[in-house]
Image (cartoon, helix red, strand yellow):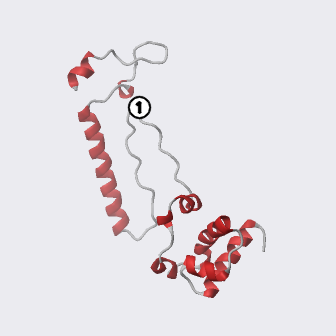
Amino acid sequence: MTKLRNDAPPPEDGDGRPAADPAKGRWSAQEMLLAAMVDEQRLSRWLFVQANSKGGKTAPPAPIKRPGAAPARKRMSLKDRLRLDPRMRLTAAKSRQMTPAELAPYADTLLDARGEVAIGHAMRELHTGREKAQEAVRLARLKRGRR
């Protein structure tokens, strides 16, 4: 790998000139592995702090930028993930602990998929009792602007 890198022509800017900034040039396998190790160490430290602190949760550390790597993609919304992945459906244990406001995005997805939803169907899909399912569907409808 090192021979290939050494024999390759020097990296160029868009103008055809050699790149001035070595950080924007090619990385060897060792540099990529070192960056991966630093990323893992940062993530381990972040996980340790999150697990042992009583403060608010913070975003995980950003990985070291690598040359030629595409920028990070945006995360999909909960609504889009529910539509695409059936594994994202609620489990009974999870939905029991949720409030109707937290269940509203799931109810909104049901309304998108089926139009009007019978409360019995919402109860089965949301794994909740009648009152909680009715409130979640009501909140989802209010968010949409209809009753």
Q: Residues within 10 Å of mark 1 (few under 14, many from 20)?
A: few
Quarter of the image holding residue 126?
Answer: bottom right
Toward the right, the furthest residue is 146
- x then y, percent, for residue 11: 37, 19
Q: Nearer the viewer, residue 128 or 43?
A: 128
Residue tagged 1: 68
- x then y, percent, for residue 135: 66, 81
**Residue 31 horizontal side relative to residue 122, left or right:** left
Check disc 1 and report its element: helix, strand or loop.
loop
For residue 27, above or below residue 134: above
Q: Quadrant of the N terminus?
A: top left
Q: Nearer the viewer, residue 34 or 56?
A: 34
Please give the name of the residue rendered at 31% of the width and 30% of the height, measured from the top-left corner. Answer: 27
**Residue 4 horizontal side relative to residue 119, left or right:** left
For residue 35, above or below residue 89: above
- x then y, percent, for residue 91: 47, 75
For residue 82, above or below residue 27: below
Q: Nearer the viewer, residue 103 or 18?
A: 103
The amino acid pointed to by label 1 is Gly
